[in-house]
Amino acid sequence: MIFTQDRFETYEDEFNNAPDKSAFFDKYYNPDAIFIHPYKGTFKGKEQLVGFWNSGKNSGHDGIHEILHLKNFLAVEDRIAVELNIEWRCLKDTDYLGPRKAGDVFWGHCAAFYKLRDGKFAEVFIYLNLAKSDETAL
């Protein structure tokens, strides 16, 4: 089953708007999914990945609201490749990917590669470049 661009756009919208990513994970990820982030490391399974995504205290995104902006999408059989701009909005002072102040907005350019199993993500590998301070979405 091919994961369509429409379904990925729904995934993106749900990711952008879910304050708690627990139900989101269950809908789109295999229970033993592996997520490899170039700066933050490897996360295995729901507890680690949801703990990283959620914006609460002691999470990987403490003080950050992350918003995905899809630029390009390609799916073949059980694999997906996407190009994204990522917008990070600082809800408070934070050290996420460098020191940031409340109200700051910063951007990254991302390529992500997904492997599917049973129609859900089994592995995600991310390449990420932070945008220059005067650069926003391209």
Image: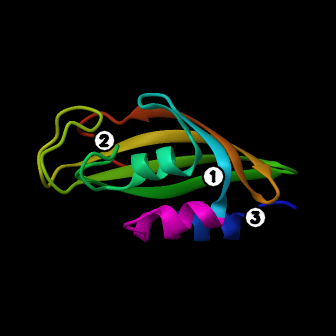
> What whole-number distance in Å separates the C-alpha atoms at marks 2 and 1?
19 Å
Task: Tell me where residue 120 appears, x and y as whole percent.
Answer: 73, 57
Residue visible at 68% across and 70% down? 6
Judge the density around disc 2: few (<14), some (14-19), many (≥20) Cα neighbours within 10 Å.
few
Above or below, comparing residue 128 to residue 62 in the picture: above
Look at the numbered discs 2 and 3 and tell me whether their residues touch, using CB distance below 8 Å: no
Residue visible at 24% across and 51% down? 57
Which contiguous range is marked in magenta?
A: 13-27
Residue linked to disc 2: 135
Residue linked to disc 3: 4
Q: SS at mark 1?
A: strand
Q: What's the residue type where badge 1 is placed?
A: Asn
Q: SS at mark 2?
A: loop
> What whole-number distance in Å separates the C-alpha atoms at marks 2 and 3?
30 Å
Q: What's the residue type where badge 2 is placed?
A: Glu
Residue linked to disc 1: 72
Q: What's the residue type where badge 3 is placed?
A: Thr
Look at the numbered discs 2 and 1 and tell me whether their residues touch, using CB distance below 8 Å: no
Circle 2 or circle 3, nearest the eye: 3
- Apparent side of residue 121 relative to residue 63 in the rendered image (left or right): right
Task: Tell me where residue 87 appears, x and y as whole percent.
Answer: 36, 52
Task: Tell me where residue 91 appears, x and y as whole percent.
Answer: 18, 57
Residue 9: mark in rendering? none
Query: Which of pointers 2 and 1 lies earlier in the amino acid sequence?
Result: 1
Query: Which of pointers 2 and 3 lies earlier in the amino acid sequence?
Result: 3
Of residues 84 and 60, which is closer to you in this image?
60
In the rendered image, the quadrant that contains the N terminus is: bottom right
Dominant secondary structure, magenta: helix
